[in-house]
Structure formats: C-alpha cells, structure tokens
Amino acid sequence: MEAVNALAASPVAADAEAGRIPRAYGVDRSGIHGQVARSLHIGRATYFRRL
C-alpha cells in the first residue's frame, strides 16, 4: 500500500496514473476495469499500459 501511495504521489503524470489505478481497482474496489478507466478519465488502452 505504501508503494502504491508513493507512486500515486509522483510529480510525473504517467507515474501518478500508474499509482492511482491499482488503488482504484484493488483497494477501493471501484468496479471492473472498464469502469475504473472511465472513473479515472483515461482510455482502456492507457489503463492497461499503466496497470
């Protein structure tokens, strides 16, 4: 959890997205992959690249 939070706090936008995805999907249980991608306002392809 600490690693995910540290990645989400990164000043680099791509790294920060990469940290928000596992938190939204695995920790917060925000829904299936497509729903999580939409909630983060990113496309499915970007979502899976960051994941």
Image (cartoon, rainbow, N blue to C red):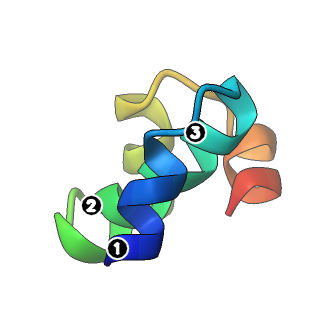
CA–CA distance between discs 1 and 3?
A: 15 Å
Q: Which residue is mark 3?
A: 17
- Please rate how many residues cluster around mark 1, counting C-alpha atoms within 10 Å: few if below 14, some from 14 to 19, many from 20: few
**What is the quadrant of the C terminus in the image?**
bottom right
- Please rate how many residues cluster around mark 3, counting C-alpha atoms within 10 Å: few if below 14, some from 14 to 19, many from 20: many
Q: Which mark is residue 2?
A: 1
Residue 31 visible here: yes
Which amino acid is tagged 2? Gly
Q: Which mark is residue 31?
A: 2
The mark that comes first in sequence, 2 or 3, is 3
Q: Nearer the viewer, residue 12 or 48?
A: 12
Asked if the residues shown at circle 2 and circle 1 are in contact, with their CB atoms under 8 angstroms apart, the answer is no
Which amino acid is tagged 3? Glu
SS class, disc 1? helix
Asked if the residues shown at circle 1 and circle 3 are in contact, with their CB atoms under 8 angstroms apart, the answer is no
Residue 19 locus on image (x, y percent):
51, 54
**What is the quadrant of the N terminus in the image?**
bottom left
SS class, disc 3? helix
On screen, residue 24 above or below 12? below
The mark that comes first in sequence, 2 or 1, is 1
Q: Nearer the viewer, residue 34 or 20?
A: 20
Residue 34 visible here: no
CA–CA distance between discs 2 and 1?
A: 22 Å
Q: Quadrant of residue 49?
A: bottom right
Using residue 24 as the reference point, say whether residue 7 is left or right of it. right
Q: Could you tell me which residue is drawn at 68 percent across and 43 percent down?
A: 15
Q: Could you tell me which residue is drawn at 54 percent across and 54 percent down?
A: 7
SS class, disc 2? loop
The mark that comes first in sequence, 1 or 3, is 1
Residue 3 locus on image (x, y percent):
46, 72
